[in-house]
Amino acid sequence: MVGCLGKLYESVENLNHTYILQGKNKEIFLKPKAPVPFTSVSLVLLTDEPTDKTYYICDYCSRQSSFSDDPKTTCRTCSRAMTRALSYGAPPQKKDGPNESGFVKDAVTYMVMDDLVLKPLSIVSSIVLLNKYNVKELAAVQEKDVHFGMNEALKLLKASLHSSNVLTTVFLNDECDY
Ligand SMILES: [Zn+2]
């Protein structure tokens, strides 16, 4: 596989289920059911609740027994198109703890490598990493805060399809023409 989505995939596959939030399932990431309505799963940026869905009911019948998500659907009673729009009120997001949205537990810090290999971060894994890259001077290690918005997400997706240095490409390469 060109790029490194394969490594990301493998990381998720290998991630112990204890890191996954209760009630969530990594299968939805590993085996996305495409094509599906984008309101239920967008394959890359996973969201599982539709937030701006519109439904339609008949504007003529006073007793409504059915609704549709397509305004061209005809009413079962009067056969006219169901044109009266209702907006979907999404229930409040269930939160088990601070910011527990997404798929993995918030209490754990995760390490994402340049080739998108992902694993839980620990002191041991950090030391192993410093050794692996032969870092002798800890002072040479730099910390960099990055902004991650939709733009960066698109750059990241693009880079992940053909490069193994995804984070470098997106965040450390200002002249990059993405
Ligand atoms: Zn009707």
Image (spheres, rainbow, N blue to C red):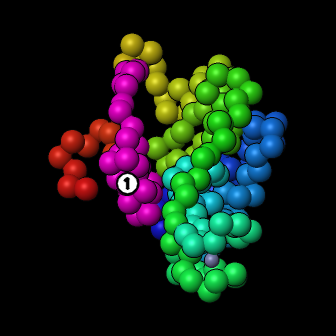
Q: Is residue 79 magenta?
A: no
Residue hosting label 1: 154
Which of these two is toward me, 19 or 120?
Answer: 19
Q: Quadrant of ligand 1?
A: bottom right
Using the rendered image of the protein, determine whether residue 1 is visible from the camera's viewpoint. no
Q: Is residue 48 above or below residue 130?
A: below
Give me the residue at 74% from left, 68% from top: 65
Residue 10 sits above or below residue 82 on the image: above
Q: Residue at x 69, y 81 (%)?
A: 77
Q: Is residue 38 left or right of residue 107?
A: left
Task: Give the residues drawn in magenta, as a range.
Answer: 141-167
Can the viewer see residue 13 in this picture?
A: yes
Tell me where residue 76 appears, x and y as whole percent.
70, 82
* Residue 146 point in image, percent of width and height: 36, 31
Task: Locate the C terminus and report the quarter of the image it occupies.
Answer: bottom left
Does the residue tagged 1 have its C-beta within 8 Å of any atom of ligand 1? no
Q: Is 96 rendered above or below residue 70?
A: above
Give 131 or 54, whichever is nearer the viewer: 54
Residue 161 lies within the magenta run: yes
* Residue at (60, 68) in percent of width and height: 57
